[in-house]
Image: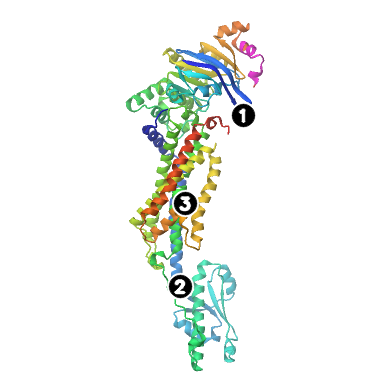
């Protein structure tokens, strides 16, 4: 038996990297997903959040029938709400998304109140529009506050303590630190950091494996003294390098986006500085190494690029759905999740973003399984490449 | 020197397709041995077993005394293979393609560069060597593939239908190259289904049909044995029918 040659592995890795760097399509796809998908989407979300925050501060409320309830209008104006006349056909305009919310005061409001009945106001909105939610909530809260104040005044007039009608006092204590607010932004940054580590090397991995078979260059390669494990390792290293590059580009994108984003207006002193950048890299290292090994294995099993691609897309779907499931999980995460690749990394990334330090033990835990899987996948690739079926095409 | 004894290989779930069925032959150093046979005769499978890509079911084969099944790695160092599949890396230049294989064979530096230059010169592809392989013609690709197979100066050279897709000028150049390699003392084993080529080039001819050796000898010997006028007619007669040429 012959021993592995580091020089040959380096030769293989170098050749695969040169080959991929010259592949404009692969490089373009890689950089577009790295740059466009993450940071640009993030920028859009941040802008949305900023404009919502703006909206919430100065509510502009179109009112129909303001003459029926002058006291309510006066209350709203005291609360810094800009009262506008409601345009005709406002329901249609809300449906189209041109208006967020309209207050419609019943024509019989004054008469009802005078008779001691409850006056009716209608708040018209379309709650399926995320953009409108802040305005809706604020208008609703203001109307409730007005109702309470009014009721309290009536009770006082009748010599009843207001507490009689309001036996429950709710005191809210929000434990979110400033950094743990903006959970959507938090999720996006962690998710796309992961995403980059997962898809960054995909095109290159498939090209060096299934592509090699497709263009009939694998058979001559296997007649050289390069050992199957050397080929597997060299190709894997090249893909890892590209994957690492994709992650670095994505994280740099976040770094720049979050530096120039209008963060203070949203009220998130959100930090993605050099320290967070470094923590991200430390957390993502196991995936940067593991995913290429799996992709190379998948790629070797496909006889054509297309075949490998369809095999891989399912894998990628499964991997990318994990963090989404985790985000929507209501309870605290179970401890064993710290061993599961991707899930463990996602949890650590969100912690890094909340400004927490990374505990060494959990970090080691998140490295363990990917390390084993990486070695296993490489051995599988080597075994696959040493089979004659890889040349003869039979199964 | 390549020695093959009773080599056999079957494919299919129950081994029902006997691609090579008990082949024995010897390819001497300093000579070109031709494997002549119709499509599907087992030439490619036989060469793949010698190239250590396919493991024989039975029999043995050795290159310079090294068994292909027992020490494939040592055999690979010794052989240069122009296989049935001969894809280049299209984004690399011809020179880079050749250099990659040289490096995998453990060559480096000035020795490798000089060796590549000499091959490019011999094959007449120096002027295109630094262009990406993407733009090469069929003949240029083939020549780069040949240079790639010869970069480590192998003692034994296996060529699977090397003249496929070459024009007359390139074919003649290739023949001259192969003859000079034989004159250097290399052992060449060369498969083809083109009669004239084998007759023109090979000192010794092995005719394969349905995975078996049908006849062995020089072109004149084979013609004499069959009692026919030309090698082509001898070939048809030895195979027992005209089917091979139609298939």
Q: Please determine if labels 2 and 1 lie on a single subunit.
A: no
Q: Please determine if labels 1 and 3 lie on a single subunit.
A: no
Residue B243 falls within the magenta-colored stretch: yes
**Residue A277 placement (x, y as % from top left):** 36, 54
Snapshot quadrant of residue A9: top left
Q: Main secondary structure of the magenta part?
A: helix
For the magenta stretch, what is the residue range? B234-246
For the residues marked 2 and 1, what is the alpha-carbon distance in whole angstroms?
72 Å
Q: How is the image coloured?
A: rainbow
Chain letter, disc 3 residue:
A
Q: Please determine if labels 3 and 2 lie on a single subunit.
A: yes
**Residue A246 placement (x, y as % from top left):** 42, 48
On the rendered image, what quadrant is the C terminus of chain A found in? top right
For label 2, count other residues whose C-alpha is less than 10 Å away and answer few (under 14), some (14-19) or many (20+): some
Kindly report which numbered mark, 1 or 3, lies closer to the viewer in this rendering. 3
Chain letter, disc 1 residue:
B
What label sits on residue A340 in the rendered view? 3
The answer to whether A76 is drawn above or below residue A360 in the figure is below
């Amino acid at each position: 038996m012959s021993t592995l040659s580091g020089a040959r592995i380096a030769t293989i890795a170098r050749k695969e990297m040169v080959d991929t760097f010259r592949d404009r399509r692969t490089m373009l796809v890689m950089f577009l997903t790295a740059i466009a998908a993450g940071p640009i989407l993030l920028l859009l979300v941040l802008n949305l959040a900023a404009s919502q925050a703006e909206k919430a501060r100065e509510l502009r409320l179109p009112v129909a029938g303001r003459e029926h309830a002058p006291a309510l209008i006066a209350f709203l104006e005291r609360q810094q709400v800009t009262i506008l006349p409601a345009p005709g056909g406002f329901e249609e305009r809300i449906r189209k998304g041109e208006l967020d919310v309209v207050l419609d005061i019943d024509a019989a409001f004054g008469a009802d109140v005078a008779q001691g009945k409850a006056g009716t106001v209608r708040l018209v909105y379309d709650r399926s529009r995320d953009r409108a939610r802040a305005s809706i909530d604020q208008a609703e809260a203001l109307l409730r506050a007005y109702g309470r104040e009014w009721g309290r005044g009536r009770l006082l007039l009748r010599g009843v303590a207001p507490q009689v009608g309001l036996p429950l006092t709710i005191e809210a204590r929000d434990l979110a630190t400033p950094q743990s607010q903006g959970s959507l932004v938090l999720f996006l940054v962690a998710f796309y950091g992961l995403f980059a580590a997962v898809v960054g090397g995909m095109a290159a991995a498939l090209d060096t494996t299934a592509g090699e078979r497709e263009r009939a260059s694998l058979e001559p390669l296997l007649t050289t003294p390069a050992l199957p494990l050397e080929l597997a390792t060299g190709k894997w290293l090249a893909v890892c390098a590209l994957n690492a590059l994709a992650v670095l580009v994505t994280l740099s994108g976040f770094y720049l986006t979050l530096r120039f984003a209008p963060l203070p207006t949203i009220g998130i002193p959100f930090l993605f500085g050099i320290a967070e950048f470094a923590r991200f890299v430390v957390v993502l290292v196991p995936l940067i190494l593991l995913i290429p090994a799996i992709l190379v294995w998948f790629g070797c099993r496909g006889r054509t690029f297309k075949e490998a691609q369809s095999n891989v897309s399912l894998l990628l779907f499964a991997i990318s759905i994990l963090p989404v499931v985790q985000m929507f999980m209501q309870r605290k995460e179970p401890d064993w999740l710290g061993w599961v690749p991707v899930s463990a990394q996602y949890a650590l990334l969100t912690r890094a973003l909340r400004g927490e330090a990374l505990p060494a033990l959990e970090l080691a835990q998140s490295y363990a399984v990917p390390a084993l899987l990486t070695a296993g996948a490489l051995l599988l690739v080597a075994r696959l490449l040493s089979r004659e079926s890889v040349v003869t095409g039979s199964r | 020197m390549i020695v093959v004894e009773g080599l056999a290989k079957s494919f299919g779930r129950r081994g029902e397709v006997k691609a090579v069925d008990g082949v024995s032959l010897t390819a001497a150093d300093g000579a070109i041995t031709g494997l002549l046979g119709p499509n599907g005769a087992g030439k490619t499978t036989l060469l793949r077993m010698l190239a250590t890509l396919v493991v024989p079911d039975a029999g043995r084969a050795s290159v310079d005394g090294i068994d292909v099944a027992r020490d494939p790695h040592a055999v690979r160092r010794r052989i240069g293979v122009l296989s049935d599949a001969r894809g280049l890396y299209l984004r690399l230049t011809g020179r880079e393609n050749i250099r990659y294989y040289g490096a995998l064979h453990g060559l480096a530096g000035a020795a490798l560069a000089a060796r590549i230059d000499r091959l490019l010169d011999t094959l007449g592809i120096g002027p295109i060597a630094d262009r990406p392989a993407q733009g090469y013609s069929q003949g240029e690709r083939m020549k780069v593939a040949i240079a790639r197979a010869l970069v480590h100066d192998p003692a034994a050279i296996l060529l699977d239908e090397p003249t496929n897709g070459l024009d007359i000028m390139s074919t003649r150049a290739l023949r001259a190259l192969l003859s000079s390699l034989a004159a250097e003392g290399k052992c060449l084993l060369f498969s083809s289904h083109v009669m004239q080529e084998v007759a023109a080039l090979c000192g010794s001819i092995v005719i394969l049909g349905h995975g078996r050796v049908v006849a062995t000898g020089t072109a004149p010997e084979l013609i004499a044995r069959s009692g026919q006028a030309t090698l082509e007619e001898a070939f048809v007669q030895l195979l027992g029918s005209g089917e091979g040429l139609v298939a």
